[in-house]
Image: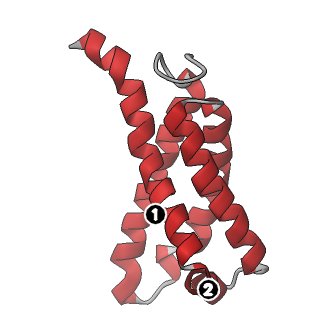
Amino acid sequence: MSDFIGKFGPVTGRVLVALIFLWSGIGKIGGFAGTAGYMASKGLPMVEVLLVLTIVIEVGGSLMLIVGWKARWAAAVMFLWLVPVTLAMHNFWAVPPAEVMGQQINFMKNLAIMGAMLFIMAFGAGPYGVDKK
């Protein structure tokens, strides 16, 4: 079992953590105006620029993680990007009571994803990635 997890765990983990970003980034492309409006409602400046940057990070970073190419760099960028995103978009302490639980769950989900990114930064893509590290 340990050998199996050692061989296939890293690639499976990379794909699973990347899927949320790939799905989200593609959704933002199709729903650009709606997403920009939501970002503006959170008080963010230059939402179109930030949204394009977000799409590039989500789609580009997730594809890099999935294939294991420059996975450490992709994880580092995604980790750093997640810090302000988590604080700005999932600030459960500053939303109406009806939204607290949902935002708190998303906040904690992002913390867990940040942990996964730290893991990839530390250990690389694993044996089944373009980088093979």
Q: Determine which quarter of the picture holds residue 82.
A: bottom right
Residue highlighted by disc 1: 107
Residue 130 in sight: yes
Q: Position of residue 107 (x, y in %)?
A: 46, 63
Quadrant (top left, top right, bottom left, bottom right) of the C terminus: top right
Identity of the residue drawn at 45% across and 60% down: 23
Residue 112 in sight: no
118 or 132, nearer to the observer:
132
Are the two marked residues, 2 and 1, in contact with CB atoms closer than 8 angstroms? no
Identity of the residue drawn at 54% across and 75% down: 30
Local SS, label 2:
helix
Q: Three-letter amino acid code at disc 1?
A: Phe
Q: First in sequence: mark 2 or mark 1? A: 2
Identity of the residue drawn at 30% across and 19% down: 5
Could you give the CA–CA distance between mark 2 and mark 1, rounded to whole angstroms?
Answer: 24 Å
Q: Determine which quarter of the picture holds residue 14.
A: top left
Relative horizontal placement of residue 14, taking residue 39 as reference (left or right): left
Identity of the residue drawn at 53% across and 25% down: 125
**Viewer-side label of 2, 1:** 2
Residue highlighted by disc 2: 33
Q: Is residue 107 above or below residue 46?
A: above
Q: Position of residue 43 (x, y in %)?
A: 68, 85
Q: Which mark is residue 77?
A: none
Neighbour class for label 2 at 10 Å: few (<14), some, many (≥20)? some
Q: Position of residue 64 (x, y in %)?
A: 59, 39
Neighbour class for label 1 at 10 Å: few (<14), some, many (≥20)? some
Q: Is residue 63 above or below residue 56?
A: above
Q: Three-letter amino acid code at disc 2?
A: Ala
